[in-house]
Image (spheres, rainbow, N blue to C red):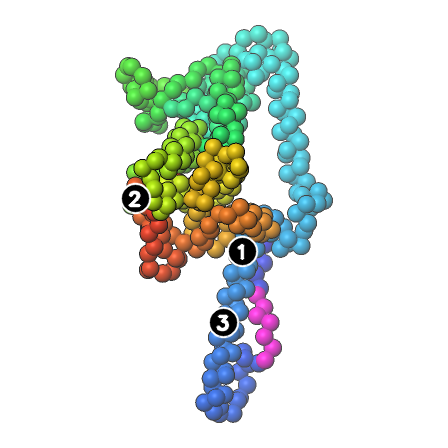
Amino acid sequence: MESFSKGNPLQFSSGYTDGVFESQQQPRETNSQQLSQDHKEQQQQQHIQDIEESFLRTLSNEVQYKKFLKQSPYSLTDIDLRVILQRLLDNIEDGQQKRNGKFKGTNKRLGKEQPREGRKTVVVLGTGWAAHAFIKLASTYDLRIVVVSPVNHFVFTPMLASAAVGTVEYRSMTEPIRVTNPYIDNFVEGRAIGVDDDDSTIKRDESMGVGTVIELTYDYLLCAVGTASRSSMVPGAKEHCFNLKTSQDSKRLRTAIGEALEFASRPDVQARAERQKRVRIAIVGGGPTGVELAGELMDFYSQVCGRADGAFQHLRDDVSVMLVHGGPELLPAMDVDLRERAMRALQAQGVELRLSTRLREVGRDYITICKKGSDTKETTPVGISILAAGN
């Protein structure tokens, strides 16, 4: 950001005018005066720390940054004209490409019914957001496109939480890559296991089907494989936590939630503590995925347990959802108003929030957490634990 470059330094003002920083000669102080002076210095130091923390929090998202620059984040006049122009040109280009037939491998303007000779080959790794955006509008007239991924569809990830509780069906949030652009040259289902820069080849493994390792040649390689949760950092998380990144994750979680309700309803489960444990769900991560999932779970519980005609109304007083987040606020990338609104909404629904709390260990039927900056650990029995950190 230009505002932070050399020659335009940030300036902080502590607001103190009591002469604490002045170097003028002062008479010798008594013990009480010295204590008062020390107290003032501590207050001053704390005040500076509060300013720094407030400043960092202010610049933690785009809306607050625009407010910091005294711009309205909702005014069109404060949007960079270059951004508006670039978006306009992108839309015009996309529309023109669809009209001139390049999407279909033809060129109506030149009267060409076949793809261009000597096309460059682009191998795309992945079927996530970046890969999907490229595949959707890429010119198959100019490029030969080959997609490699263990998943043959794109997932609209904001709907994963809804799919996990049955609000949305899986087919409503997925789009097959061959449907995204039916004119790509090929889709290869598999994982890339190696890249040879010298020969411009990529190796696809044989785990997804019968045969040997496949080598694909390319002119350009687009690597858009995304990220993976670092569950190995917490003992037991990889073995016992559910994730929520793919449609298969939502299916597994949906099955586990149904089984947890059924297990808690078994006639041999008489102790209330055991019932509560089986239908207690712990979500780790207060980002968009964790917050959305917590809200969806409470809505689901209110329908199947809270209503008089609910299928599991006998578990009304036993179900619970706990959200563990390492930061002091939920949704740190969002506007402050949205953070506060999300926290109030979850609290109103009955979600147990554990902010500034770290996950230390995960077991088959428990999680161990501790307050940030403390060594005191707390073990909580749970039926399902979900790792949504980093999502």
Q: Is residue 347 left or right of residue 378?
A: right
Give me the C-alpha separation between circle 1 and circle 2. 35 Å
Q: Secondary structure at mark 3?
A: helix
Identify whether 377 is placed above or below 130: below
Q: Amino acid at mark 3?
A: Gln
Could you tell whether 264 is left or right of 112 in the image? left
**Element marked by disc 1:** helix
Q: Which mark is residue 363?
A: 2
Chain-order first, disc 1 or disc 2: 1
Q: Which mark is residue 57?
A: 1
Q: Mostly what secondary structure, the magenta segment?
A: loop
Residue at the spot x=57%, y=64% of the render? 11
Asked if the residue at tag 2 contacts the one at tag 1, i.e. Cβ–Cβ closer than 8 Å, the answer is no
Q: Is residue 364 visible?
A: yes
Q: Nearer the viewer, mark 2 or mark 3?
A: 2
The answer to whether any part of residue 224 appears in the image is no
N-terminal label among 2 and 3: 3
Q: Amino acid at mark 2?
A: Gly
Which residue is the site of mark 3?
Answer: 45
Q: What range is drawn magenta here?
A: 12-18
Question: Label 3: how many residues lie within 10 Å, few (<14), some (14-19) or many (20+)?
Answer: few
Tell me the SS state at disc 2: loop
State the image coordinates of residue 228 (x, y, percent, origin top left): 38, 37
